Image (cartoon, helix red, strand yellow):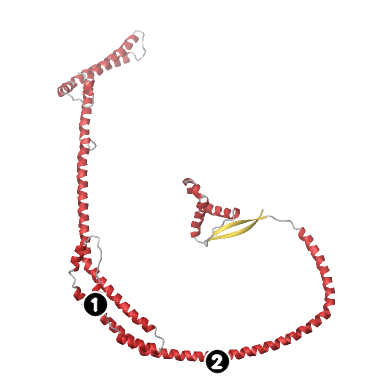
């Protein structure tokens, strides 16, 4: 039974009653086709054996007819087995389709896998969101615990800032004293220095935290007993300044001695300076007298020399004229020799020595700015550092363009054109 063409189309439903009937008869069809095949081959082999020596004219039609029967038998075999092979092909396509419907690339499995992937992504998002919330809460708690520490540090800074300001005021006054009377004034200032403390009463700690509200910060600050803290800071302030004032008062005797020593030294230096000035003036007067005596002697010697010179003038003029004639003759000879020298044309070439690795970077920058930036990537990749150096040497020769650098040395060479 032959399968209709529309039943072979993809997705067509195969009737199992027909499948069973066709396949059940497949053994009979096979045996029938095999018997026909064996008989035909056996008959053909016998005819080949009988006519192996020589084919006769009587036998020729029989063989030709046998070949024609072979074709008829072949077509019969094909028709007999066609329903079986067709149903097997149809079954194969149906099996393949059913298997594909359950494969990992089928729309159904892809849809199921997408559901799993979406669920996993959502779980990962929830996990990440929970982790971020936990981290943010940890940071918030850390900032909350930092409030008291920051407040204490702020008040400590203000305390030591005021202590430093008071010490600086005292030191500036103390260091500015240059005389005994000024020292007496600073001593009185230190005795009467009042340690006034009221700055901390006006200090208000205020800091913004990214994860805390102002209400949370103020609530946390209520844990601090500021009255106790201010009392401690006042005691610290007074204690530090009292110690510092005593230290400065202890320096007053040595400061007085230093001023006295300085005044004594200044007087001694002034006396030495006055003595040196007196001696300088005496030496200056002596030098002036010696110079005046020398000037008079030089004027007399000059007058004597003029008289001698006038007596020798005539003789000197004659000698000068003779010498002039000799020089003119020698000059003429030299001019003639100079005219025989041929003019030589020259040119300058330069060879660059790289004294430091940074020089190669500067050579690349010079080459790229003046030539390389207009080239393609392929041409730039083929450019070597040596060719970049040669480019810079040619630019120095032709364009008188030099790279100003401590890492490159231009060696000048004179060449004949």
| Residue identifier under label 2 | 275
Q: Is residue 139 left or right of residue 304?
A: left
Q: Secondary structure at mark 2?
A: helix
Closer to the camera in the image, 400 or 165? 165
Q: Is residue 267 above or below residue 240?
A: below
Closer to the camera in the image, 120 or 64? 120
N-terminal label among 2 and 1: 1
Tell me the quadrant of the picture where the N terminus can be found. Answer: top left
Q: Residues within 10 Å of mark 2 (few under 14, many from 20)?
A: few
- The image shows residue 85 at horizontal and vertical percentages of 23, 23
Using the rendered view, name the quadrant where residue 91 is placed: top left
Residue at x 20%, y 68% (from the top left corner) = 221
Residues at circles 2 and 1 in contact by the CB criterion of under 8 Å: no
Residue at x 29%, y 13% (from the top left corner) = 69
Which residue is situated farthest in the left direction here? 17
Residue at x 82%, y 72% (from the top left corner) = 320
- Label 2 vs label 1: CA separation? 61 Å
- The image shows residue 242 at horizontal and vertical percentages of 28, 84
Using the rendered view, name the quadrant where residue 131 is placed: bottom left
| Residue identifier under label 1 | 233
- The image shows residue 386 at horizontal and vertical percentages of 53, 53
Q: Is residue 380 left or right of residue 314?
A: left
Using the rendered view, name the quadrant where residue 233 is placed: bottom left
């Amino acid at each position: 039974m032959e399968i209709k063409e529309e039943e072979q189309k993809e997705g067509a439903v195969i009737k199992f009653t027909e499948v069973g009937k066709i396949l059940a008869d497949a053994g009979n069809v096979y045996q029938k086709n095999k018997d026909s095949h064996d008989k035909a081959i056996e008959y053909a082999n016998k005819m080949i054996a009988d006519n192996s020596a020589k084919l006769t004219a009587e036998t020729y039609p029989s063989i030709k007819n046998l070949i024609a029967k072979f074709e008829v038998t072949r077509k019969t075999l094909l028709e007999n087995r066609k329903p079986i092979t067709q149903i097997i092909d149809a079954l194969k396509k149906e099996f393949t389709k059913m298997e594909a419907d359950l494969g990992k690339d089928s729309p159904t499995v892809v849809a199921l896998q997408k559901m799993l992937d979406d669920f996993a992504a959502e779980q990962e998002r929830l996990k990440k969101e929970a982790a971020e919330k936990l981290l943010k809460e940890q940071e918030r708690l850390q900032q909350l615990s930092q409030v008291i520490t920051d407040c204490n540090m702020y008040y400590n800074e203000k305390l030591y800032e005021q202590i430093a300001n008071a010490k600086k005021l005292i030191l500036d006054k103390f260091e500015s004293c240059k005389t005994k009377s000024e020292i007496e004034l600073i001593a009185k200032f230190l005795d009467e220095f009042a340690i006034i403390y009221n700055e901390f009463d006006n200090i208000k700690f205020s800091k913004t935290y990214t994860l805390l509200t102002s209400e949370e910060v103020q609530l946390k600050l209520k844990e601090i007993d500021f009255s106790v803290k201010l009392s401690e800071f006042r005691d610290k302030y007074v204690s530090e300044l009292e110690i510092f004032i005593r230290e400065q008062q202890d320096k007053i005797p040595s400061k007085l001695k230093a001023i006295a020593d300085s005044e004594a030294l200044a007087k001694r230096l002034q006396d030495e300076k006055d003595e040196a000035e007196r001696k300088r003036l005496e030496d200056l007067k002596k030098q002036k007298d010696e110079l005046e005596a020398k000037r008079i002697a030089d004027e007399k010697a000059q007058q004597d020399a003029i008289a001698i010179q006038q007596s020798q003038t005539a003789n000197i003029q004659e000698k000068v004229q003779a010498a002039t004639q000799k020089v003119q003759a020698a000059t003429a000879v030299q001019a003639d020799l100079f005219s025989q020298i041929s003019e030589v044309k020259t040119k300058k070439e330069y060879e660059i020595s790289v004294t430091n690795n940074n020089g190669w970077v500067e050579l690349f920058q010079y080459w790229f700015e003046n030539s390389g930036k207009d080239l393609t990537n392929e041409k730039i990749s083929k450019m070597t550092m040596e060719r970049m150096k040669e480019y810079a040497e040619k630019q120095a020769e032709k364009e008188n363009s030099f790279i100003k650098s401590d890492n490159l040395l231009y060696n000048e060479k004179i060449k004949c054109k």
